[in-house]
Amino acid sequence: DSGVTQTPKHLITATGQRVTLRCSPRSGDLSVYWYQQSLDQGLQFLIQYYNGEERAKGNILERFSAQQFPDLHSELNLSSLELGDSALYFCASSVDPAQGVNTEAFFGQGTRLTVV
Amino acid sequence: DAKTTQPPSMDCAEGRAANLPCNHSTISGNEYVYWYRQIHSQGPQYIIHGLKNNETNEMASLIITEDRKSSTLILPHATLRDTAVYYCIVSRNDMRFGAGTRLTVKP
């Protein structure tokens, strides 16, 4: 158990709909990362937050957005869903105690999103 | 962040050492080298990281060349459960994964 909790584990929804994925980081971790992994593909970095602020942005579509709340949990919002958005979505967290100093990240078990 | 180059696949015999190379020729002075692995569709698992010295933990050893342009992850006695995709990342801040190396440990 990595200590990172993602909910829900599975989600099935229709095209055009909107969903919210939730991530609770490990206790004490300030930084949260989101990734998308389509079937048999690599991990695509979406976005990173540190202590509530966006720190880095990757290949995140405009239909997707994320935020990190004061209690440090994070949500990834996916809207106007398309069939191609079906994927595993992973969240990771790390301590990141000082700007520019990184530590190892711990991953949740992912949310499997199926768009039908 | 610097990019990395890894072989797409490798095989290793069970019980033998698995040596996974990674090239990161554009690494900058404050970037760490991290290794993760992903078994099937599970969440990636942290293995080890280092800046410039060699590192060892209960899972693996990390050898970083003196010029820091490449590194090798060593699994000293590979088991079937070590079959996974191994990712090398160099990072100061965000973590962007490449395609990794698919290691297959064979009986």
Image: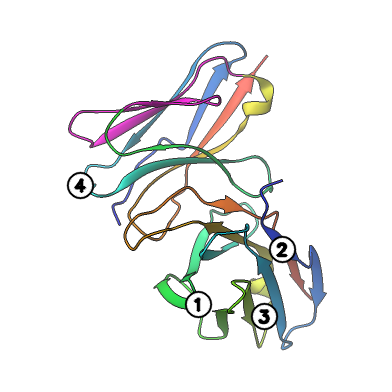
Please state which of residues A33 and A81 is positioned toward the viewer in this rendering: A33
The disc labelled 2 sits on which kind of residue?
Answer: Gln
Residue identifier under label 1: A52
Chain where mark 1 sits: A
Q: Is residue A14 magenta?
A: no
Q: Which mark is residue A82?
A: 3
As for residue B60 lying within the magenta part, the answer is yes
Q: Residues within 10 Å of mark 2 (few under 14, many from 20)?
A: many
Classify the position of the N terminus of chain B by image quarter: bottom left
Between discs 3 and 1, the one toward the N terminus: 1
Q: What residue type is disc 3 on?
A: Glu
User: What residue range appears in magenta?
Assistant: B54-78
Query: Closer to the observer: label 1 or label 2?
Result: 1
Q: Residue at x 33, y 45 (%)?
A: B32
Q: Secondary structure at mark 3?
A: loop
Q: Position of residue B38 (x, y in %)?
A: 60, 42
Measuring 41% from the left and 35% from the top, which residue is drawn there?
B7
Report which residue position mark 2 lands on.
Answer: A6
Residue pointed to by mark 4:
B29
Residue B67 is situated, as x and y percent measured from the top left of the image, at 17, 33
How crowded pointer 3 is (Cα within 10 Å; few <14, some 14-19, many 20+) is rated as some
Mark 4 element type: loop
* Mark 1 and mark 2 on one chain: yes
Query: Who comes first in sequence, dot 1 or dot 2?
Result: 2
Do the CB atoms of the residues marked 3 and 2 lie less than 8 Å apart? no
What type is the residue that disc 4 sits on?
Gly
**Residue A25 pos. (x, y %):** 62, 62
Q: Are marks 3 and 4 on the same chain?
A: no
Classify mark 1: helix, strand or loop.
loop
Q: Are marks 1 and 2 in contact (CB under 8 Å)?
A: no
